[in-house]
Image (spheres, helix red, strand yellow):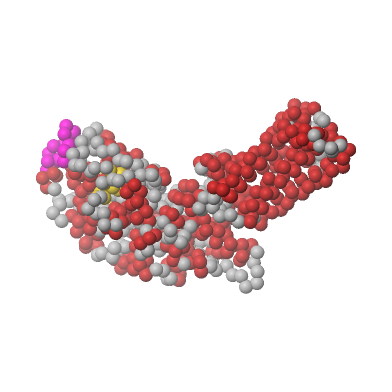
Amino acid sequence: MTTTERRISKPWSRLGETLLYAFGQIRTVKKAYPGITHLLIFWGVLIQLIGTAIKIMQMGLFVPFTWPLFSDKVYFGYELIMDLAGAAILVGVLMALIRRLFIRPDYMENTWDDYYALVLLALIPLVGFFTEGLRIFIRKPDWASWAPIGNWTAGLLQNTSLTAAQASIIHPYIFILHVGLGLLIVASIPFTKMRHMIFTPIHIFFKTSRGKGELESIDDIMNAEELGATAINEFSSLNLLAFDACLQCGRCEEVCPASISGLNYSPRTLLLMLRETMAESLLFPQEGSDSNLTPDLLKEEYLWSCTTCGHCLDVCPAFIRPPEQVIDIRRAQVLMTGDVPTTVGETLRNFERQGNPWGMPSQDRMSWSEGLNIRVLNPGDEVDVLYYVGCAGSFDDRNKRVTRAFIDVLNKLGVDYGVLGEAEMCCGETARRMGNEYLFQVAAEENIALFSEYTFKTLVTLCPHGLNTFRNEYPRYGGSFKVLHASEFLAEKLQEMNIKIPGEANYGKLTFHDSCYLGRYHDVYAQPRQVLTQLDLKPLEMKASRENSFCCGGGGGAMWLETAADTRINHNRLNHALELEVDTITTACPYCLIMFDDALRSKGLTESIQVLDLVEILNTSIQYITGSIIDPVIYLTSWISS
Ligand code: SF4
Ligand code: SF4
């Protein structure tokens, strides 16, 4: 991939993060049982390694590299710490075995090297304790009580018929076995999953500093030789490092909406297949092996199931970004081979012909505004709020009603706003997530040039995908401006105006669905709930909400794909709402609205449950404003005109 990203900037902060996440295991322990298991093994092994290195220095094996002899007190402490570290490894291994053999989470794969590593990890401290027990049994040293497990083992030996002389004979052999097991585990690291002990900290150190909502750019795209990845050696070296850094822990698969919904896709197996391809063609090449991606990786389920919801990014302890690898392959498919699903091809052709995924002409961009008195800006105009309507809000019939509602709200709140009218263009998000980086970059440059013709304080949009594109992706192309999602803008505005709006309409039991691109990518969780609270509405929380929200299934271009009815992500998400027996589902994203609408229709539930955008609810409730500081003239005029 042609990119200028340098991953050695701010080395001290990188080192700090590596210490925090690789050594502190901050992300790993978020999941209590496997986290504590890993923590015990990791720190146990690390302490044992450091302790062994110190001991070797003491033994004068590598003169002149020696270490001053321990004082008695220090040595007692050393023995205690080494004993506790060995015990930690044993407890960790036992917990890991219980999880693998009895708890058996669905996403967990058991392979030979998992058991190989666990058995070796258990044998080393077990043999170590036996060696220590023999030593204490033979010499009865002063520090014996400071090595409680070794001392306990010596006590056990005491109760056998073994004599000190016999123990002295077998001790060197057991010691050599202990050292041999240690060397075996070190030698096994490159050939087993234990390689992550080395590669995960390195990957964390070199991880991208791009925000999680920003995809890697293809620099100088017109002259770039590689557009995405059709072969394993076309991934960047840091991507290849990620394949080795993957622990295969399955945390990504456990939260992936595509995997949960039964699609034949998992970010964990994606990484596994990429690693295997890398091993076969680059690390241990054999005659006939090539670096081209395997057909399994190129099949539709693998390339097009990911909705780029970002949940895997948040949970991966190695900071790997599986959707970026997916998009690398999509780029090659879209820009090089053209081998894409029919609906993807149609959507991208719509974009090429009409400049938007809906394939609608720009003259139709204002069709939603019929009968409304809207200020369409002219180049050079100045305004507080530039309202970017977006493609869904302009062309999708259901979302056009939301756009109209937002205009009502802006009028009622007396906001100085304007829209771009037919001059507005698609932000390019769908094209980029579908892999057409070229269309995206053209859209970014054109939009940045367009926005620069107007003077505005804030760009406001109802679409979290547009928000992410403007806020996280345009700055790289020279477009930096203040961008707010409508829910952020409204929460701020309502608070600033200090108004309390009693919700008059009856929404029954209501829940709020967190859009991935609003919540997970921008941490906007409180603001939509704050708006609902100001309407005296108390949203019920679905079992997957806020940071743990479950994707609606519409992101990453997935809204345009056909999926079998029994594997639809939106049906799964609707089930979460149905569990609460709600009457109203609130969204704050045009894609989520479409996906819920579709799921309700498919399940024949449109009569019993309504799905509404946040601004539709606000617009209805705002009719009942009392005692507000809203300019009554503006309010009445806009209310009458609406
Ligand atoms: S990508 Fe990350 S979360 Fe997924 S299996 Fe690999 S290490 Fe675990
Ligand atoms: S971004 Fe979401 S859909 Fe894509 S792999 Fe990660 S969890 Fe799965």
Q: Taking 332 as reference, is 594 left or right?
A: left
Tell me which corner region of the image, top left, top right, bottom left or bottom right, holds residue 37.
top right
Residue 109 image position (x, y, % from top left): 56, 55
Query: As displayed, is residue 36 above or below residue 80?
Result: below
The magenta span reads 621-637
Report how many numbered discs are placed on residues in the image. 0
Query: Image point 37% across, 54% down: which residue?
Result: 572
Query: Image point 69% across, 54% down: which residue?
Result: 188
Residue 143 image position (x, y, % from top left): 77, 29
In this orientation, which residue lies closer to the viewer: 34 or 575?
575
In this orientation, which residue lies closer to the viewer: 503 or 361?
503
In this orientation, which residue lies closer to the viewer: 351 or 607?
607
Q: Taking 616 as reference, is 440 left or right?
A: right
Residue 459 image position (x, y, % from top left): 30, 47
Residue 11 image position (x, y, % from top left): 57, 44
Query: As displayed, is residue 438 above or below residue 34?
Result: below
**Camera sees residue 469:** no
Q: Please, which residue is most extreme toward the bottom here?
A: 288
